[in-house]
Image (tube, coloured by chain):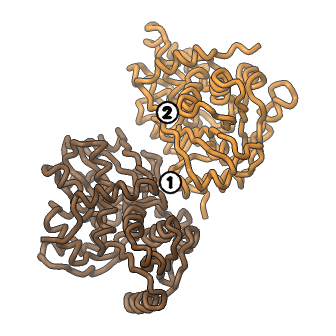
Chain colours: A brown, B orange
Amino acid sequence: MSTGPTLDDIRVAARRIAPFNHRTPVMTCATLDAMAGARLYFKCENLQKTGSFKIRGATNAVLQLSPAEAARGVVTESSGNHGAAVAKAASARGIAAHIVMPKNAPAVKCRAVEGYGGVITFCDANVEARQARMKQLLEETGGVLVHPYNDRRVIAGQGTAALELLEDVPELDVLLVPVSGGGLLSGNSIAATSLRPSIRVVGCEPANADDAYRSLKSGHVEKNATTDTIADGLRAQLCELTFGILRERVDEIVRVTEQEIVDTMRLVWERMKILVEPSAAVALAPAIARTIRADGKRVGVLFSGGNVDLSTLPFH
Amino acid sequence: MSTGPTLDDIRVAARRIAPFNHRTPVMTCATLDAMAGARLYFKCENLQKTGSFKIRGATNAVLQLSPAEAARGVVTESSGNHGAAVAKAASARGIAAHIVMPKNAPAVKCRAVEGYGGVITFCDANVEARQARMKQLLEETGGVLVHPYNDRRVIAGQGTAALELLEDVPELDVLLVPVSGGGLLSGNSIAATSLRPSIRVVGCEPANADDAYRSLKSGHVEKNATTDTIADGLRAQLCELTFGILRERVDEIVRVTEQEIVDTMRLVWERMKILVEPSAAVALAPAIARTIRADGKRVGVLFSGGNVDLSTLPFH
């Protein structure tokens, strides 16, 4: 039995974070429906504040700190969307945020963190250096760790996306969610299966970073063999907490090739006129490839974010 | 006195075309508000069917054809959004659409027209060849011309965008609209000034194709000296009909540089996570440059379309 958050935790989170975040729209697209042979409902977290769903979990965690904890500020590590989200959530509460980022993080991501008032501490771009720097920073500042997914408060916050989606489209048959460390998939699978037990929840993962797929097969937490994927938000791996939730709540993990990611991302940009990042395209790719047995079904697709560097697009 | 459509014509058009087109959302963006020093309301015709506002006018014209006219089909010329819109509007009525396009039209635009069932007739890429081919095609097919802007039905259709925008945001102080042949600006200036006489309507035009700016200065229809602008939707020039309407309804035309167009387009993509084409960015650029005296005002911005070729983006 996992010790993840409950539907009630997610409902409370939704009320807690509502004043700070967008209720994102649910979009549809007749052309993509025809390609998928299904009715697709896109939950557009690319249009969320900070450009990704991460602000949901970060806000839910930061708002639950005690005054004494808050006074010490928060600490996290991220080369991407979670860092910006924690910086913004901390800023909204008026407290400090320290973000450990690798030296080679894209300039655009650093600017986003700094734009929200986060203080960046750079480290060498390897796991050991990052963990050492995090440990040091936690000791120096006395700050509270807001882990990107190994945290029940963060998972509950992320789950508010599916809560909203199922309020707008109650009769979903399938829900497609990208999976990396599993925070998004955990929270949303809890919300979706609690509200609608018949729903089939499918995790979508790059084949080049398929730890979740292999973990559910083998029955224990596997490591990524490579993280060589354009989906820069999906290079993390499950922890015991998220693995336990996924085992209970997720029906299947499907894997997506790099070519499918780029093609799907382009399709969304061209047809829906919205920017989704590669990690978000991963959730739609299996519907377009028709590998998820969703013919004629109502399929929710969680577009996780829209942060891309326009200077280095993969389109030719 | 112009002989343009009235507010009533636009209201009738709105009811006529509603079953066929999207009511597009009005989006906002706190970051862009801060940059502009104003409250911006974006009417997102980039999210409209066919990816631009053109489907409004095309649908309104095609639906008014008599059965005898409809049986002969429609004819137009366009290297861009109007061609796709006419093809789709004709397809919805089940009639033929012939579109004259220059031989050098982008493949993506040709695919769009064909995708909606339009029949393309190619011509050499100059005005004389195009006009000759149009004349020939009108004779051959007996089809009805649906001009992109020299047509009261088309202008009334385009005006439904401002009708919707002012229903959603009644207290607008300023309305920014791109101007090319003047169909969009004519229809929307009629709707906006009729509904809200105090509103200031500003046409936004590339400095490199500034016939409208010069026409309103000189008091007669001027020709474009060049059409060397990235805003591929804004290379046409006013006709007597649209010029007459603009003289009565538009307060000012402001000109925008090529660099401003690219910078503004990038800003929208990065901050709003939606695709706008260069022509749409032209409408926002003066607000960002703060050249329109809109401090603290409520400013409507008509995002005209989102059709761009992702293989040739101007971002570096």
User: Where in the figure is residue A59, as x and y percent of width and height?
Assistant: 41, 64
Quadrant assignment for the C terminus of chain B: bottom right
Q: Is residue A307 left or right of residue A282?
A: right
Q: Which mark is residue B84?
A: 2
Q: Amino acid under label 2?
A: Ala
Q: Give the amino acid type for the residue marked by disc 1 in the picture.
A: Lys
Q: Give the CA separation, mark 2 to mark 1.
A: 24 Å
| For residue B97, above or below residue B227 | above
Q: Is residue A125 left or right of residue A237?
A: right
Which residue is rendered at x = 44% and y = 68% of the image? A81
Q: Residue at x 55, y 70 (%)?
A: A108
Asked whether the residues under marks 2 and 1 belong to the same chain, the reply is: yes
Q: Can residue B251 be seen here?
A: yes
| Circle 1 SS class | loop
Kindly state the secondary structure of the residue where label 2 is placed: helix
Q: Is residue B140 visible?
A: no
Asked if residue B181 is positioned above or below residue A64 in the image, the reply reads above
Query: Residue under mark 1: which chain is it in?
Result: B
Position of B41 with respect to B285 (left or right) is left
Residue placed under numbered mark 1 in the picture: B273
Residue A8: percent from left, percent from top: 24, 57
Which numbered disc, 2 or 1, marks the residue that appears first in the sequence?
2
